Amino acid sequence: MTPDEVLARLREEFELPFFQVKVEDKTYSEEEYQQFKADLMRYFEEYVGNFEN
């Protein structure tokens, strides 16, 4: 999938219609997409989630 498709899918899955993130300009496989999504979720939990504590 293209970077635009990756971003569109993330927006839909996260239910954040204006979500923006820098996506590398390459073709993503499903496995690469799932890893990218997992990395974003881990980043949020580690950095943004700790801000509240």
Image: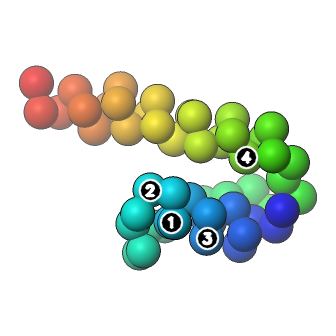
> Dot 4 surroundings within 10 Å: few (below 14), some, or many (20 or more)?
some
**Residue at figure coordinates x 74%, y 56% from the top left:** 24
Q: Are marks 1 and 2 in contact (CB under 8 Å)?
A: yes
Q: Three-letter amino acid code at disc 3?
A: Ala
> Dot 1 surroundings within 10 Å: few (below 14), some, or many (20 or more)?
some
Which residue is under mark 4?
Answer: 33
Location of residue 35 by image quarter: top right
> Dot 2 surroundings within 10 Å: few (below 14), some, or many (20 or more)?
few
Report, in whole angstroms, how far the alpha carbon at label 1 lies from the one at label 3. 5 Å
Q: Are marks 4 and 3 in contact (CB under 8 Å)?
A: no
Q: Are marks 1 and 3 in contact (CB under 8 Å)?
A: yes
Q: Are marks 4 and 2 in contact (CB under 8 Å)?
A: no
Residue 38 at what x, y percent from top left?
Answer: 57, 34
Q: Three-letter amino acid code at disc 2?
A: Phe
Mark 3 secondary-structure assignment: helix
Which residue is under mark 3?
Answer: 8
Q: Earlier in the sequence, mark 2 or mark 3?
A: 3
Mark 4 secondary-structure assignment: helix
Report, in whole angstroms, how far the alpha carbon at label 4 lies from the one at label 2. 14 Å
Report, in whole angstroms, how far the alpha carbon at label 1 lies from the one at label 4. 13 Å
Which residue is under mark 1?
Answer: 11
Residue 20 at what x, y percent from top left?
Answer: 49, 67
**Residue at figure coordinates x 46%, y 37% from the top left:** 41
Mark drawn on residue 14? 2
Residue 19 at what x, y percent from top left?
Answer: 44, 67
**Residue at figure coordinates x 59%, y 43% from the top left:** 37
Q: Are marks 2 and 3 in contact (CB under 8 Å)?
A: no
> Dot 3 surroundings within 10 Å: few (below 14), some, or many (20 or more)?
some
**Residue at figure coordinates x 28%, y 38% from the top left:** 48
Q: Earlier in the sequence, mark 1 or mark 4?
A: 1
Q: Earlier in the sequence, mark 4 or mark 3?
A: 3
